[in-house]
């Protein structure tokens, strides 16, 4: 595809170089039912995507890390999504959790679907530190009315 140089009027030069558009589109199916088209590269570059890193990995003397989930999130409204219909219909101000531990492909698909749905995504490691996760959620400014989804 020929491109004109900025000084085309002066010397009449044309830049003739191959151009590539890189897109990674994948289709998500649940058995034989189509669920969604996924733009993986765009989702992975999204500012709505983050992950939690436990501070205890840096500070071995931190005793606050390792608290139980039931203590940390006892007053929070959490919604679990266990299938694609539930993932697609997540809504509200509650914190949603997509349970896909140990299945990297489902985690990737759930991440991309939620980014495309304009939700804030937090990737949670296998051995999550609930204290660090709670602190991460409190520090971030998600804005009012924006959905937050944990991919666990």
Image (tube, rainbow, N blue to C red):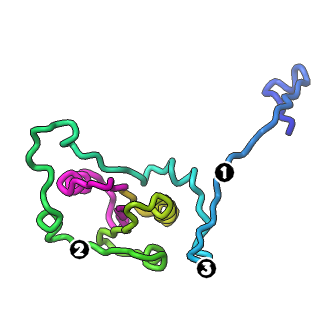
Q: Residue at x 14, y 50 (%)?
A: 65
Marking on residue 105 = none
Where is residue 108 drawn, in percent x and y? 49, 58
Mark 3–mark 2 Cα distance, whole angstroms, equals: 31 Å
Would you call the spot at circle 3 few (<14 residues within 10 Å), some (14-19), or many (20 or more)? Answer: few
Mark in front: 3 vs 2: 3
Q: Which residue is mark 1?
A: 23
Q: Residue at x 21, y 51 (%)?
A: 132
Q: Is residue 57 left or right of residue 107?
A: left
Q: Which residue is mark 3?
A: 33
**Span of residues in magenta:** 123-152
Element at badge 2? Answer: loop
Q: Which residue is mark 2?
A: 77
Q: Residue at x 86, y 36 (%)?
A: 2
Where is residue 112 drawn, in percent x and y? 51, 60
Among the two numbered marks 1 and 2 on one chain, the one whose residue lies closer to the N terminus: 1
Q: Quadrant of residue 48?
A: bottom left
Mark in front: 1 vs 3: 3
Q: Is residue 139 magenta?
A: yes
For residue 97, above or below residue 62: below
* Residue in the foreground of this view, choosing between 31 and 141: 31
């Amino acid at each position: 595809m020929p491109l004109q140089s900025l000084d085309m009027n002066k010397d009449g030069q044309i830049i003739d170089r191959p151009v590539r558009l890189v897109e990674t589109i994948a289709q998500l199916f649940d058995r034989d039912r189509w669920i969604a088209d996924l733009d993986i590269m765009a989702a992975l570059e999204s500012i709505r995507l983050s992950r939690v890193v436990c501070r205890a990995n840096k500070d071995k003397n931190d005793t606050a890390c390792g608290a139980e989930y039931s203590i940390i999130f006892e007053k929070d409204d959490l919604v679990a999504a266990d299938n694609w219909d539930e993932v697609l219909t997540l809504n509200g101000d509650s914190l949603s959790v997509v349970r896909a531990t140990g299945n990297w492909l489902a985690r990737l698909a759930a991440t991309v679907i939620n980014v495309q749905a304009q939700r804030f995504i937090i990737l949670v490691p296998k051995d999550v530190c609930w204290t660090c996760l709670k602190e991460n959620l409190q520090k971030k400014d998600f804005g009012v009315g924006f959905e937050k989804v944990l991919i666990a």
